[in-house]
Amino acid sequence: MERGALLDLRSAAPDREVVEALLERPGVRIERIVSTGQASPAAAWYDQPGDEWVALLAGRAALRFTDGALLNLAPGDWVLIPARVRHRVEATSADPPCVWLAVHLDPAS
Amino acid sequence: MERGALLDLRSAAPDREVVEALLERPGVRIERIVSTGQASPAAAWYDQPGDEWVALLAGRAALRFTDGALLNLAPGDWVLIPARVRHRVEATSADPPCVWLAVHLDPAS
């Protein structure tokens, strides 16, 4: 049976984000992401065709939206980012590293 | 934008499990479950038509499978329980309460 440990930080890399697909099915993908201080490049926005349900499980992070809103996230905080709502990762803590759990949903076909 | 706090324990109830649907879409349902010492009734087994990806985010818990295997879970541990793999919740901690995040996947149609 497939299993893993979301909070195991041995995969943390100080110089880059580590993205790991935990489950991929038609219409849904569960990802674990470990960030260590990275942010989206200036003026780079995620603009996704499907909804994303994302939770921060460890660390501190902030998401920025195009209307200027800043969403600060603490461990356990989740947000549903609707398709086409542009957003960027404004900041992630390096110590402790950020652990994200993201569920990407394909657009309804 | 819909949001919430997975680790907010104000919804914990000492006498029962609290199940909250965080997202429902065709083929996928994300649930948060807070357990406070409950276990599956004796000889009661979950036998689900679809796969379940489940993570324990807080507390301690144990899952039992019909081959006798016991899977102890600590915070951050996740497991993919395939469809029709019968299992029961053997134990959950009350202090601290258990917070589960479950992603239920419909059987491929």
Image: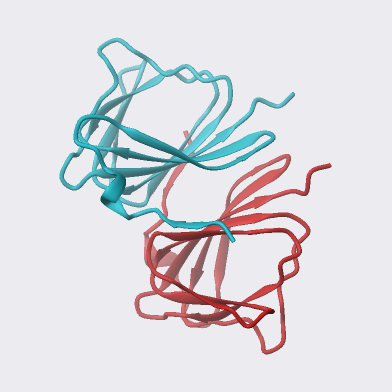
Chain colours: A red, B cyan
Would residue B62 appear left or right of A37 to someone viewing this image?
A: left
Please tell me which residue lies in front, A33 or A50: A50
Q: Position of residue A87 (x, y in %)?
A: 66, 73
Q: Taking B91 as reference, is A72 above or below it?
A: below
Q: Residue furthest top?
A: B43
Please tell me which residue lies in front, B63 or A76: A76
Image quadrant containing the C terminus of chain B: top right
Q: Position of residue A56 (x, y in %)?
A: 45, 63
Write down the quadrant of residue B17 in the picture: top left
Q: Position of residue B69 (x, y in %)?
A: 31, 24
Which residue is depicted at the point 33% across and 55% down?
Answer: B7
Write down the quadrant of residue A46 in the picture: bottom right
Which residue is depicted at the point 42% across and 19% down?
Answer: B46
Q: Residue furthest right?
A: A109
Would residue B62 appear left or right of A14 to someone viewing this image?
A: left
Q: Taking B89 as reference, is A17 above or below it?
A: below
